[in-house]
Image: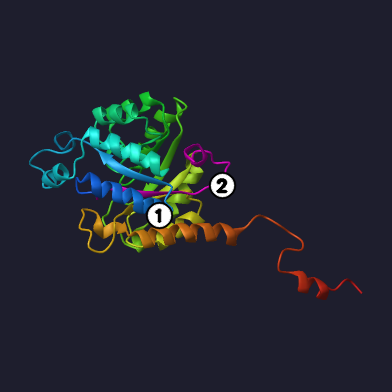
Amino acid sequence: MVKKIFNRKIKSKFLIAEAGINHNGNLKEAFLLVDKAKESLADAIKFQTYKAEKRVKKSSPIFSILKKCELSNEEFFKLKKYCDKKKITFFSTPFDCESVNFLNKINVKLFKISSFDIANIDLISEIKKTKKPTIVSTGMASIGEIQSTFKKFKNKNIPLALLHCISSYPNLEENSYLANITDLQKKFNCPIGLSDHTPNIKTSIYSYILGANIIEKHFYLGKGHNCVDKSVSLDPKKMKQLKTELINIDKILGDIKYGFKKGEEFAKTLRRKKM
């Protein structure tokens, strides 16, 4: 599946359940997110790997939240094995070089670079060393910054995908700028997707019609689950609905076909020839 999403010649959809830090630093909660993501038909589940002290300053207003939601390397190793058992792709967004090396050591299939690190040369260089497929979110990035990151990976022949993203939590549908997807497709010879921070699924559906074959949506357990990204997350029911709609879109779009098509049997009998 991972190789498939990085091949533009193959029609595909790759739905990522972005669990992020919605596990609240609790491994059992993380396991449950994996279970529900699998049941929701997501193709992958993504987390965030970091040491809070290396991600933000201790004086940051979000330091205590990040520290609380931090998982140890041992816990991530168990989480990766659990995902393998459940047959759902596990990967994570690293926020420091040590986390890149750890994730590579436990054999993740791909990496994710957050919008906040699209210009982080040290982190990008460390990920490039792994030579593994990488997905990059482009929130807040200028076209020059996107081009620079794109070249860094393409010059080393490392598969890359770009996700259009608005770094607003939550984001309004009318502020989604989906026209960027079409523009990115013209400018970059790589898969283009969407990291969607709206609280519903409509924007993701529109992006798929425009050609986005990777869609990332924040994911939580639903009503009663208190977590950091609750306001931008889909519950299992909504996530499954999104995947079902994406499948239906493929059926509705169909393949290119002229002449008599399925459903035109009766009309064919009424077709008139030149008198």
By what rule are the colours in the image chosen?
rainbow
- Image side of residue 188 versus residue 175, left or right: right
Q: Which residue is mark 2?
A: 11
Give yes or no for residue 12 being in the magenta stretch.
yes
- Circle 1: is it few (<14), some (14-19), or many (20+) Cα within 10 Å? few
Q: Which mark is residue 259?
A: none
- Image side of residue 173 versus residue 70, left or right: right
Give yes or no for residue 59 being in the magenta stretch.
no
What span is colored magenta in the figure? 1-22
Q: Position of residue 116 (x, y in %)?
A: 27, 41
Closer-to-camera residue (232/87): 87
Q: Position of residue 23 (x, y in %)?
A: 24, 49
Q: Position of residue 157 (x, y in %)?
A: 47, 27
Task: Name the residue located 25 percent from the left edge and 58 percent from the top edge.
Answer: 230
Q: Which mark is residue 39?
A: 1
What amino acid type should be assigned to the residue bearing mark 2? Lys
Reading the chain from its start, which is encountered first: label 2 or label 1?
Answer: 2
What amino acid type should be assigned to the residue bearing mark 1? Glu
